[in-house]
Image (cartoon, rainbow, N blue to C red):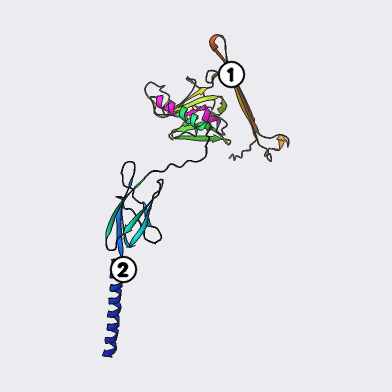
């Protein structure tokens, strides 16, 4: 029994010695590559860059300082490839010496990807106009320009204003009617049309905005922080609506749209030949000496059917 254990110990010793000898031989026939990857423009380190020895499974990623270290690299000429997102890849040939560490610093240049032509119409201009009005205002306001309103499928001003941040819309029979600013009640807001206070038709102090078509508006400004120079009845906020003018555009202009939808009617009295639609047309021009006068005509019409259910006790 003792002799058998002795044989086992001898075999394990021989295997361990062979493993150490093989590891030592492999270490003597391999080298180390270390260095840093930086931006070629400003020399800043590039963390997370991929560093790979071509033709092998040896690779790593750079640390937060852009440094890397590759061990057990076979001796001889090796190709080191470094890649990073939005940068041009770099390949360098290195003569690795067995048992030696070599330092390689890599500079990567940023890469500009060119694609096909992209055409954007209207969006840039409408955003610029809205942002420009916000910059010129002395108060905390949000603005909505006519170019942006025309691109939205809104029925009236209330539904267009709800696109602004901090605005909550109150619906009536599936259409927007009243707006709330920063969670305040609608009757705490002051609504002006071209600078004049707009009377309420809702049977309360709250002003309904469903009577004004969105196509007749030039811009809308919502003031969320009322200042002392503003009317005192605007406790919650102020909504200023500016209508279109013949001087808003160069020369004579005309535009319009028609929208319709055919579906099963909910109200039988309308008949099968009638269907909901919405149409609008706006035209304007300047007349007189030096175009001192302007004429603008805007008309809109719509028809829709809806049903409401109520329970009265």
**Image position, residue 52 (x, y; %):** 38, 56
Quarter of the image where the C terminus is located:
top right
Is 301 inside the magenta-drawn segment?
no
Residue denoted by label 2? 26
Is 141 inside the magenta-drawn segment?
yes
Q: In the picture provided, is 300 more to the left or to the right than 111?
A: right
Identify the disc placed on residue 252. 1
Quarter of the image where the N terminus is located:
bottom left
Which of pointers 1 and 2 indicates the residue nearer the eye? 2
Q: Where is residue 285, by image quadrant?
A: top right
**Image position, residue 12 (x, y; %):** 29, 80
Residue 211 visible in image: no
Residue 146 visible in image: yes
Element marked by disc 2: helix
Residue depicted at x 50% and y 41%: 115
Is the residue marked by circle 1 packed among few (<14), some (14-19), or many (20+) residues within 10 Å? some
Residue depicted at x 38% and y 20%: 229
Report if the CB atoms under discs 1 and 2 are less than 8 Å apart: no
Residue depicted at x 27% and y 58%: 101
Q: In the picture provided, is 293 more to the left or to the right than 19?
A: right
Q: Nearer the viewer, residue 227 or 106?
A: 106
Upstream in sequence: badge 1 or badge 2: 2
Q: Nearer the viewer, residue 10 or 272?
A: 10
Q: Nearer the viewer, residue 140 or 35?
A: 35
**Image position, residue 311 (x, y; %):** 59, 40
Q: In the picture provided, is 257 more to the left or to the right than 59?
A: right
Where are the magenta residues, as a range? 131-150
Against 109, residue 187 (above or below) is: above
Against 268, residue 297 (above or below) is: above
In whole angstroms, how far apart are the C-alphas of marks 1 and 2?
86 Å
Against 226, residue 62 (above or below) is: below
Is the residue marked by circle 2 packed among few (<14), some (14-19), or many (20+) residues within 10 Å? some
């Amino acid at each position: 029994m003792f002799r058998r254990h002795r044989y086992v110990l001898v075999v394990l010793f021989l295997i361990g010695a062979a493993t150490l000898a093989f590891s030592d031989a492999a270490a003597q026939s391999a080298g180390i590559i270390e260095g840093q990857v930086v931006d070629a423009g400003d020399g800043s380190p590039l963390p997370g860059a991929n560093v790979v020895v071509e033709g092998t499974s040896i690779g790593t990623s750079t640390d937060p300082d852009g440094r890397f270290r590759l061990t057990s690299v076979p001796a001889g000429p090796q190709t080191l490839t470094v890649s990073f997102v939005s940068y041009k890849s770099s390949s360098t040939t290195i003569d690795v010496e067995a048992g030696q560490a070599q330092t390689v610093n890599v500079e990567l240049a940023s890469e500009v990807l060119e694609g096909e032509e992209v055409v954007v119409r209207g969006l840039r201009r409408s955003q610029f106009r809205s942002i420009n009005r916000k910059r010129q205002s002395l108060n905390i306001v949000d603005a909505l320009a006519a170019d942006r309103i025309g691109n939205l499928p809104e029925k009236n001003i209330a539904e267009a204003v709800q696109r602004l941040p901090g605005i909550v819309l109150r619906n009536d029979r599936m259409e927007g009617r009243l707006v709330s600013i920063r969670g305040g009640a609608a009757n705490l807001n002051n609504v002006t049309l071209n600078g004049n206070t707009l009377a309420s038709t809702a049977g309360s102090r709250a002003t309904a905005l469903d009577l004004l078509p969105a196509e007749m508006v030039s811009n809308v400004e919502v003031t969320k922080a009322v200042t002392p120079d503003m009317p005192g009845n605007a406790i919650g906020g102020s909504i200023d609506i500016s209508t279109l003018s013949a001087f808003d555009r160069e020369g004579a202009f005309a535009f319009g749209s028609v929208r319709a939808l055919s579906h099963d009617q909910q109200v039988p009295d309308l008949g099968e030949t009638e269907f909901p639609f919405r149409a609008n047309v706006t035209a304007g021009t300047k007349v007189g000496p030096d175009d001192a006068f302007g004429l603008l005509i805007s008309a809109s019409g719509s028809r829709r059917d809806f049903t409401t259910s109520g329970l009265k006790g």
